[in-house]
Amino acid sequence: MSIDQENIINNDQIIEKAKIFFKDEIVQNHIKNTEKLVNLKEFQVNPFLDKYKANFLEGNDDAISIAKALAYPRILGTSINTIFGNQLQKFCNTTLEGFSSTTSGIDIEFIDKIDHRKKYCQIKAGPNTINKDDIITIKNHFKGIRNLARTNHLQVGMTDCVVGVFYGETYELSNHYKKIDEDYPVYIGKEFWYRLTGDVNFYSKITDAIGEVAKEVNSKELVNNVIEKLAQQISQQSFDEI
């Protein structure tokens, strides 16, 4: 992708696409996953801890309190985090389509707005979203790119293969990322978005834009309905025997 082609990409368009993506993909999938939680079989019930959590949360272990203790962590934690991670590739293909890469193992390619070199970038969600096995996988992808570049008489240095982490701060990076960073740069949060767009404030702008979408979402009634139906199932059978 030439520098001229990349310059066509408008930062405002990225933000607008991000808002549409969040509304159409993240929010809608979050709603679907929340609706499933009316079924007690969606949970791995621990009658000891779940009763404890109900008491810790509400001061009692009646059916409604147990339902809240089961559903809230899934609705506000596991579910939305999983959705965001699973939709990351689609985000790259749509919102960041102007940077899309056809290179195996690479999500996007861009001209770094700081050092003005072409970067081959793998995208990750947050500072704790890779495991130990990912270290070797990522390094092997980057090694393959550099070997191919040498075969084609291209100059691709180790600092031209990078990991871009959508959100977080450098001090939050897990040890797995730090192992990668020993050989290949890991850019996270503000620095990643600055290098990608050339706008030092872009990270704040895009997260604020997502926040605007969030203000349009009020699923209180949905959540209350899920809690009530889940509580009905709990009250209809012995929780200790589930």
Image (tube, rainbow, N blue to C red):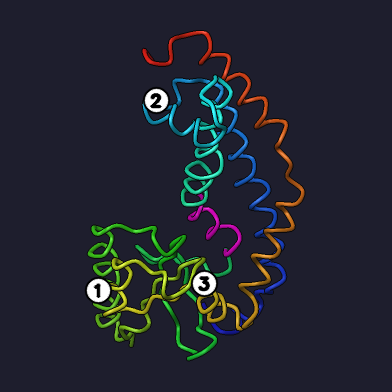
The residue carrying mark 1 is 143
Q: Earlier in the sequence, mark 2 or mark 1?
A: 2
Label 2 sits on what residue type? Val
Main secondary structure along the magenta-highlighted residues? helix
Q: Residue sitting at 45 percent across and 87 percent down?
A: 117
Measure the alpha-carbon separation of dots 2 and 3: 36 Å
In the image, what residue occupies the spot 26% across and 65% down? 135
Q: What segment is highlighted magenta in the picture?
A: 87-96
Q: Which residue is mark 3?
A: 189
Q: Amino acid at mark 3?
A: Gly
Dot 1 crowding, Cα within 10 Å, few <14, some 14–19, many 20+: some
| Mark 3 element type | loop
Q: Determine whether 232 is above or below 52 in the image.
A: above
Say which of marks 2 and 1 sits in front.
Answer: 2
Q: Earlier in the sequence, mark 2 or mark 3?
A: 2
Which residue is at 63% across, 21% downward? 228
Q: Amino acid at mark 1?
A: Lys
- Residue 73: x %, y % from top left: 50, 39
Name the mark on residue 45. Answer: 2
**Separation of marks 2 and 1 at Cα, in angstroms:** 45 Å
Label whose residue precedes the other's in the sequence (1 or 3): 1
